[in-house]
Amino acid sequence: MTQTAYDLAGGEEGIKRLAQAFYDKVFADPQLLPLFKDPDEDHAGRLALWLTELFGGPPLHSQRRGGFAQVVQAHEGGKFTQLQRDHWLEHMLSACKEQGLPEDLMVSFERYLDQSSRAAMLHSNMT
């Protein structure tokens, strides 16, 4: 039986730990904090839903939040800077390493993060 990226990331609990580790870093970063209107929202929970689906787990984000279209809409008009993108990417990669994501998963995930964060930054500045 082939393991999915979701399995390699530790399943539900591993994904939740990753999302929380990432947001612990984000909310301690003065460059990223201004991007969040309400830090009390469940940002880590929403990210966990997204990562669960992205990594081949249950389609929870689509079922509960609307999937990719909702993610794109949530970032419209954010006017993210290159510095903010760099910090976001650094924190996500650091959280992945701290959580022990396997190297074979990290190779493809790091490529995805680079491309998707670049696209999000460009899109956020178009609206």
Image (cartoon, helix red, strand yellow):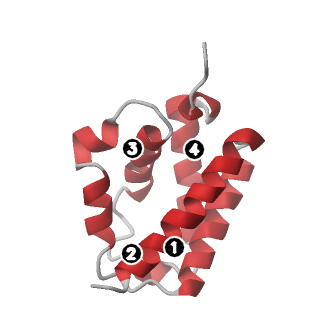
Q: Choose the circle earlier in sequence order: 3 or 4.
A: 4
**Mark positioned earlier in the residue sequence (2 or 1):** 2
Question: Residue 69: x, y in percent?
Answer: 26, 57
Amino acid of disc 2 = Phe
Q: Report whether 64 appears left or right of 61.
A: left
Circle 3: element type: helix
Q: Residue at x 54, y 52 (%)?
A: 20
Amino acid identity at mark 4: Arg
Please determine whether, in this image, residue 64 is positioned above or below residue 85. Answer: above
Q: Quadrant of the C terminus?
A: bottom left
What amino acid does circle 1 point to?
Answer: Arg
Q: Label 2 belongs to which residue?
A: 36
Which quadrant would residue 41 be assigned to in this image? bottom left
Give yes or no for contact between labels 1 and 3 (Cβ–Cβ under 8 Å). Answer: no
Task: State the image coordinates of residue 83 (x, y, percent, origin top left).
Answer: 59, 85
Count numbered badges in the picture. Answer: 4
Question: In the rendered image, which residue does mark 4 sit on?
Answer: 17
* Nearer the camera: disc 2 or disc 1: 1
Q: Secondary structure at mark 2?
A: loop
